[in-house]
Image: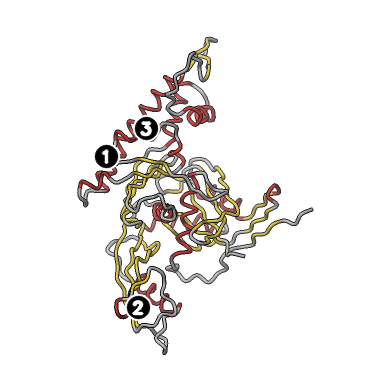
Amino acid sequence: MEKYVAAIEFGSKKIKLVVGYELDGKVYVLYALTKPYGHIVEAGSVTNQQKLAQSIADVRKFSDPSAKLKVSISEALLCLPPFGLEIFETKQVTTVISDEAKIGNLDIKNIYSLIKNGALPLENQLIDVAPQRYVLDQGRSFLKPPLNETSSTLTVFAKVHTLPKRIIGEFKAAMAAGGLNIKRSVVAPFAASELLSTYEDIPSDYILVDIGSNITTVSLVGDKELFASRFFEWGGDRITERIVESFNINEADAEKYKITYGIDKREMNFKAPICITDDGEGNEVKHYTDELNAIIKNELDLFVKQLNGAIDELLKPYDSSSKALPMILIGGGSRLNGLIEFVEPKVQSETVRAVAPRSLGARNPTFTNCLGMIIANSRYPNVYDETHPRVGQLQREPNK
């Protein structure tokens, strides 16, 4: 049986969990779920630690009778938002310690220790390391740890991901209070780029736009590697809120109409209202698709303005031609009907497309980062040498 791993992400309003494993570059999902907890995570800050900890405890052990499945998790990969993310490049060299000059796990751990203990330019805390290549004697280069290869020295070129201590501190505290150990921390856009790198139809260079419920993250990916990220406060909930205000309906109905219609350009032979409300004096008020379209387009105009501003900031160090890079949309907000047709003419990217996960059992875009963490964990050694159990018990209930 393959080694299963659990991956957790804290969205603005819900916890996301995927339990699965990587095999031949693909993620196979045992179980995936989301659990709403209200708006308690905002721009990387946890506003209700107790509620978040309880949500973690609730998903740590669960059963699904319909799937004849029981899951008990002792640790998980943790997805961190890229707020304040700084990425540095490093080169480290170590002498191979074995008498036969063959590279072993201890040599890999040693070179990771050099990176971990190295001084960082800022006050940020090291989160993860993404090796770009390993180099041995005679200039031999490897993408994966060159175990059992013969060499007197081992050199690694890597990108180091760092975040403000406050962010990792708040999420670590919540995980501990919820009874889960952190197997590894991974920043969200790095996880997403790792998943997308396994899809053959995704280019090597692109602008990654993750549209959440309240926050949108914009990242630069070059040669399938994460270079930098920016974010702004806009998400799919902004559209829902405008519908609530304009139609005078509850949030659940507003969300339903947003998902069902989006920007609806269909030409109908008759004009039927999408919903009928009361003006408070007993009079019916009918709302039509053109009204809904106007609400959505007004909000998307604000979205595009902030998106282009974030792209300008993100690509400031690079040639202006980089703004023509393809744009890849992910996250729950990317599913809005008509979004691509609205955005594409208003940005400089040559193409705009939305990409959803392709793993059976977790094809909702909300699971993109969790799936990507499982890929990243299988590809790269952990910067921290954790010795506690890798996962709890995962078992199928016997047939009755």
Residue identifier under label 1: 348
In this rendering, is residue 203 above or below 118?
above
* Label 3: element kind: helix
What sort of colour scheme is used for the picture? secondary structure
- Mark closest to the chain's N terminus, 3 or 1: 3
In this rendered view, identify the residue nearer to me: 190 or 56.
190
Q: Is residue 206 left or right of residue 100?
A: left
What SS does tag 1 mark? loop
Residue 264: numbered disc: none
Of the numbered discs 2 and 1, the one sitting upstream in the chain is 2
**Residue at the image position 35 percent from the left and 51 percent from the top:** 203
Separation of residues labelled 3 and 1 (CA atoms): 14 Å
Amino acid type of the residue tagged 1 in the rendering: Gln
User: Spatial distance from mark 2 to mark 1, Cα to Cα?
Assistant: 43 Å
At 56% from the left edge and 49% from the top edge, which residue is drawn? 360
Residue 158: % across, % down: 33, 66
Q: In this view, does 36 lie above or below 106?
A: above
Indicate the position of residue 154 as horizontal and vertical percent values: 35, 78
Say if 89 sits above or below 255 in the image.
below
Q: Mark 3 points at which residue?
A: 341
Q: In which quarter of the image is the N terminus?
A: bottom right
Q: Mark 2 points at which residue?
A: 154
Identified by mark 3, the residue type is: Glu
Instruction: Look at label 2 and name its amino acid.
Output: Leu
Query: Residue 116 appears at what percent x and percent y?
Result: 37, 70
**Most foreground residue, 293 or 204:** 204
Assess whether mark 3 and mark 2 are in contact (beta carbons under 8 angstroms): no
For this orientation, the residue located farthest to the bottom is 99
Please name whichever residue, 381 or 123, is drawn nearer the observer in this view of the structure: 381
For the residue carrying disc 2, how many other residues have a C-alpha within 10 Å: few (<14), some (14-19), or many (20+)? many
Q: Which of the 4 image quadrants contains residue 327? A: top left
